[in-house]
Amino acid sequence: MDKYYGIDLHCSKINLAKVNPENGNLDGEVYSEFFENFNSPRDLLSFVENNIPSSSRVGISAPGVLDKDNLIVKSVNSSLGEKITLGKDLRDKGYDVTLENDVVSEGFASSMFGHGKKALNFVLATYSSGHNCVRVNDGFIDFNPEFGHQDYRGNVHEIICGCGIKGCLETYCSGKGAAKIAESLFRKSWNFHISNQFELIHQHKPVVTIYRKPLSETDSRDPNWKIMDLSLRDYNNKNNSLFNFEDLNNKDFEEKILSNISGKNVYDAYKANKDGIPQKFIRDSQVKGIANSLNRITVNYNPLDLIILKGGLTNAWEELFEPAIEMYSEIGLIGKNYLKKPEILKTNIEEIGIVGGVANYIKKKADRNF
Ligand SMILES: [Zn+2]
């Protein structure tokens, strides 16, 4: 049988694997490498050539602006420069290559191999470093990369989104958003901020005021500092260093740890300690935002049979998505209660970016190869 390989070019990483074109299953292991470990486009090409036999069929999925005819990924801010020419380089070496946007590719993968097989009309929604969605309607694709940048009046409206403006839905529906909220909560306005925000979300309950104790009086076991503790551990792992909690009393070092906070730190802190106010606050804010985003998807893309969810945030399924889906099921659709609420499922395709590359290859070249 012909060999099909999928390549997923993340913002910072390449993942590739052989894929069975009949069922979309991975056939063998996934090979990965960070771009920062390649010194030149030639290094990246060698990595791929070492892991994909010559004359294979290769589907690449990638974010950014794409020149699909010339198989070049533009506008990439990576250590490899502003363009990734891997697709073109592979074609020059005799591989048969296609290139498509990652989310569009993942829509095809869901339609061919995933939960989307049973639905004529579905949305694949990404909750990851960003939030966007793609609708697949009877095989046609409608991609909305800016879905997360709609205005949403949640309880952290002052946080500035990656797009440069305040109050985007994406802040509530992304790991980057969780990290930004955490960073803001841990800055010096922390007491005031938390007490105010709690007033907002517990309108009919007594106001909860949390006083930020000086670091010298606390330690990493304090549930309110769990996010900082995890960020510090990540920093030590990355830099092979041995800083401890007391080092956070140094302002410059505290700044480094604040800017090192990741969405994963926030959700891991919630898993480890639900009693910590910062992580509980962020989780509650995001649950409401996710419920709101599901509501907007339903209204914007109706009629809809199914919403498939994917992305790093779905790893915190129990913490974020179970309560969000419950909230979504209970709330009305802003005066549109006659709309049918679609089924909601987490994607069943592991490595959907890799499988998406092959799904797009099949879609584009089906008339020639099938
Ligand atoms: Zn935005």
Image (tube, rainbow, N blue to C red):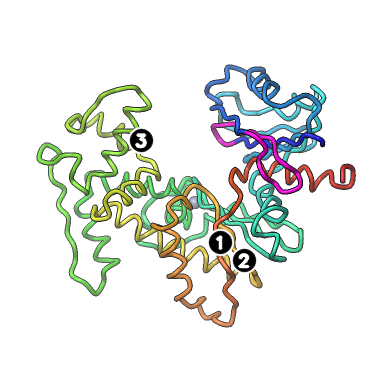
Left or right: residue 277 versus residue 81 is left
Q: Quadrant of residue 358?
A: top right
Give the residues in magenta: 10-28
Spatial CA distance of label 3 from label 2 is 36 Å
Spatial CA distance of label 3 from label 1 is 32 Å
Taking the magenta stretch, the answer to whether it contains residue 208 is no
Taking the magenta stretch, the answer to whether it contains residue 24 is yes
Of pointers 3 and 2, the one earlier in the residue sequence: 3
Mark 3 belongs to which amino acid?
Answer: Asn
Circle 1 sits on which residue?
A: 345
Could you say where residue 246 lies in the image, as x and y percent from the top left? Answer: 17, 31
Of pointers 3 and 1, the one earlier in the residue sequence: 3
For the point 26% across and 51% down, the residue is 273
- The label on residue 260 is 3
Circle 2 sits on which residue?
A: 306
Secondary structure, mark 3, is loop
Q: Quadrant of the N terminus?
A: top right
Of pointers 2 and 1, the one earlier in the residue sequence: 2
Left or right: residue 176 versus residue 23 is left
Left or right: residue 216 versus residue 58 is left
Could you say where residue 177 lies in the image, as x and y percent from the top left? Answer: 42, 49
Quick check: can you spot residue 153? no
Mark 1 belongs to which amino acid?
Answer: Leu
Residue sitting farthest toward the left: 217
Q: Are marks 3 and 2 in contact (CB under 8 Å)?
A: no
For the point 47% across and 70% down, the residue is 328
10 Å crowding of disc 1: few (<14), some (14-19), many (20+): some
